[in-house]
Image (tube, rainbow, N blue to C red):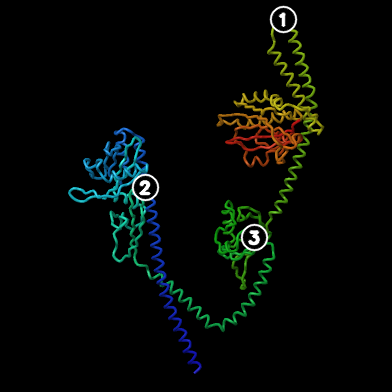
Amino acid sequence: MRSLHSLWQRWFLWLILAVLVVALLATVVWLAGRHEVEQVQSALDRDTADAVSDLRSGLQRNAQSLRASHANGTSREQWSTEAAALLREHREWLRLEWRDAALRPLAAVDTPYRRRVFDDSSRGPEQSDVALACAAARKAGASAYSPSHYVPFMPGGGLEVMELCLPVEGGGYLVASYSLRDTLIELVAPTLTRGQEVAFTEPDGTRLVAVGAARRVGTRVFTAQQLVDLPGNALMLRVDGWRAAPDLFPNLLTALVTAISIALVSVLALLARDTRRRLRAEHDLADALAFRKAMEDSVITGLRARDLQGRITYVNPAFCEMVGFSAEELMNHGGEVPYWPTELAQEYRQRQAVRMAGGVPPREGFESVFMHKDGRRFPVLIFEAPLLNAQRAQTGWMSAFIDISEQRRIEELSRASQERLQASARLATVGEMASLLSHELTQPLAAIASYASGSLNLLRSAGASSGGDHGEVAMAVRRIAEQADRAGQVIRSVHDFVRRRDRVREAVAPHTLIEAVLPLVRLQARKLNVRVDVHYEERLPRVLCDRTLVEQVLLNLARNAMQAMDLPELSERVLHMRVARTRAVGETVDTADKPDVRRWVEFSVADRGAGISDEVAARLFTPFFTTRPDGMGLGLSLCRTVVEQHGGALIYEPQKPRGTVFRFTLPAA
């Protein structure tokens, strides 16, 4: 009896389950059909809105083209030529007319694509549709449209026509006659899909014209309409779409899958007794998995497992943190993975193919490069080993990753330190050479100055005895003496600069520093076809500086600027040298209440060359770094050192639209 009762109970449960499945199936089919109808209607509404937008844009473009035809030619012959060209481009126009202020036709052109529609005798001031549209256009000061009207043909047939009136300068009007049917064909129909019909209707629903596919038997009609609000006329654009009844077969399959799922849940409910025993085993397994996961999460080494097809089946948190991707973004990736650098993807594909073919990786590991999610590249050390299951069969590969970025950074710091030590050694050698050269060149320069002075004395004596004028020769010899003395001062300044001796600084007018180097600058400027532009701010204070060293800084910056403009494609070569008051670079303290503190004078040298790239800018002031084959790479480094010894700063910045500006500051005396 108990067995029979249990059997009836099971049959009753299955009966309830069957009823639920049938009810669910019917509900799913009904909801799917309703959803499909809503989707079709929504798509048709969007198509209608897009068609109205395209229609308005097309009409606006046509009005602009019509206005442009009158602007291009004001005589009747010129306008007729322009109008004929427009009619060949716009099939929706039947006729273009130019009328005076009283609506009398001045010129008219008919479309070449159909036989003549209008009779000239009927196209006069008494035409009510045109008069109405032009009155609205005159009032609004813009284009206006007439209500649609029917133009009959002889012996039969006709067209639905709409007039466009556009006021023009001089009190006249341009009138364009639209064929509503051709307007639909040219401006609306290209944007619609197959199985749709588009029509113009009156606001009350009266259909004027329609184009498109005819309705097929056994289809359902979907309709959408929207108002085309034109100045002077209001039309409705109606779009009808034909759609077959929703397919039931896919929905039935969906319902069947849902029903099977419900059945499986019911079966699982009946097997709850067996589930309890399995839950006990799963609990023990979960403890074991939690223990293993805790160990994997505690290590800082990245771990990754792949199957024999190359898909990632496991990653630990350390690996996710290393590459910046979550486990969901990495799992089951076949082929390329997101942390492969683009430039190395081919190499990684080849290496993975070798590994999947059974290639044994080196036991000591190998180095590679990974890409973080933010695009940053970093080096890694990889160890790989076969992944074996309980039956000792290989199921994939297990990999361990160590981020060696810090190790590479330490190695880079060590290398940079070695380079700095080598640069310091080279600078020391340069200093010794400078001292040696200054000692060896002092006497020849002194001899040149003595010979120049003697030559001047001889020229004076010869001029006094012969009464001749040796002014140009004397001037040249005097220049030789001045430059020899200047060279001696430069050598002594370099010697003291290298030996770190205290230099005597003096108050010098800024324009004196510029004018001292201008002869040499202009000499090189003439060779390179460069125009020199010098500007001084009014009432500049004197600057406290070592005059010789600052002149060398100005000369070096000016020469660099002119060499930067020595490009064949550069036609306008201008060197700008400017002196102005300023506060020190980086100073933000308001010194209005301390007029004698932090007063600075800024010197700037600007060129119009190709500018400085980011790679060159990073090493611009590094000793021995140069971009010229004949350069030593010490000019800008020494200039910066000289300016900083005076308490100022040397900076550079791009010049608009092209070129570079170097600025340095000196303290005011």
Q: Report if residue 647 is visible in the image.
A: no
Question: Do labels 2 and 3 touch, CB within 8 Å?
Answer: no
In the picture of the structure, the residue carrying the numbered disc 2 is: 58
Going 29% across and 48% down the picture, which residue do you hit? 162
Q: CA distance from mark 1 to mark 2?
A: 96 Å
Residue marked by disc 1? 466
Q: According to the image, label 3 marks what residue?
A: 321
Distance (Cα) linking label 2 and label 3: 55 Å
Look at the picture and state if 394 lies above or below 421: below
Relative placement, left or right, of 547 versus 66 is right
| Spot occupied by residue 147 in the image (x, y as percentages of width and height) | 30, 49
Q: Earlier in the sequence, mark 1 or mark 2?
A: 2
**Quarter of the image that includes the C terminus:** top right
The amino acid beneath tag 1 is Ser
Pick out the residue farthest to the left: 155
Q: Secondary structure at mark 2?
A: helix
Q: Residue at x 46, y 84 (%)?
A: 14
Residue type at the position of mark 3: Glu
Q: Position of residue 290 (x, y in %)?
A: 66, 72
